[in-house]
Structure formats: structure tokens, C-alpha cells
Amino acid sequence: MSAMEKVQIRLPSEDLERIEREVETGKYPNRSEAIRDKVRKSYFLEAIVEMREATDGTDRDAALERLEGTREAYFEGFTSGSD
């Protein structure tokens, strides 16, 4: 895992309250881990959206090529420790 840096963010009170509830129920050990997990999950969601877009259209071979390129790009990002 790469070194962590401290950042300051502002969240709407509803989002922070939801995170606090998840910490209180034991889903996460603390706010920082909850926020890190949600950021990581957002990367997966972006990858899913790009993969769906890559498969749109009628040319199956071209769609599969775009899909493979998208998968490779995201896989490299996830495995290089740049989460």
C-alpha cells in the first residue's frame, strides 16, 4: 500500500451522519476507513459504467476490444496500489 496523505474534505451533514451510523454499527472501524472504502468503490462503479459504454453498439468485435482496453486500464490502476 502506498503512503497515506492527510486531506481535509467537506461533506454534507447527511453524508457524514450516514458514515457515522456505519461506524457506530461496526461496518467500519472509523470514519477514515469508511471514506477510503467509499472512494475505492466509486472507482469500481466508474469502471462498470465505462465497460457498459464500451459494449454499446452493434459491432461486437469492436465492443469487445474497447471492453478489454477498459478492463486492462482499470486492473492496472487497482493492482498498482494507486487506490
Image (spheres, rainbow, N blue to C red):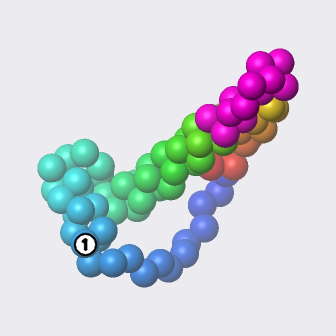
**Residue sitting at 27 percent across and 78 percent down?**
13
Closer to the camera, 73 or 81?
73
Closer to the camera, 9 or 46?
46
The quarter holding residue 24 reads: bottom left
Q: Residue furthest top?
A: 61
Q: Is residue 5 left or right of residue 19?
A: right
Which quadrant: the N terminus?
top right
Position above or below: 39 against 63: below
**Residue sitting at 58 percent across and 37 percent down?**
48
* Residue kind at label 1, given as amino acid type: Glu
Closer to the camera, 22 or 5?
22
Work out whether residue 75 can be spotted.
no
Q: Does the segment drawn in magenta span residue 37?
A: no
Magenta-tinted stretch: 52-63
* Residue 7, percent from left and from top: 54, 75
Mark 1 Cα shell of 10 Å, populated few (<14), some (14-19), many (≥20): few
Work out whether residue 20 can be spotted.
yes
The quarter holding residue 76 reads: top right
SS under mark 1: helix
Position above or below: 4 against 64: below
Q: Residue furthest left?
A: 25
Q: Is residue 12 left or right of residue 52?
A: left
* Residue 42, percent from left and from top: 52, 50
**Residue sitting at 68 percent across and 33 percent down?**
56
Q: Which residue carries the number 1 mark?
A: 14
The quarter holding residue 31 reads: bottom left
Q: Is residue 69 left or right of residue 57?
A: right
* Residue 10, percent from left and from top: 42, 81
* Residue 35, percent from left and from top: 42, 59
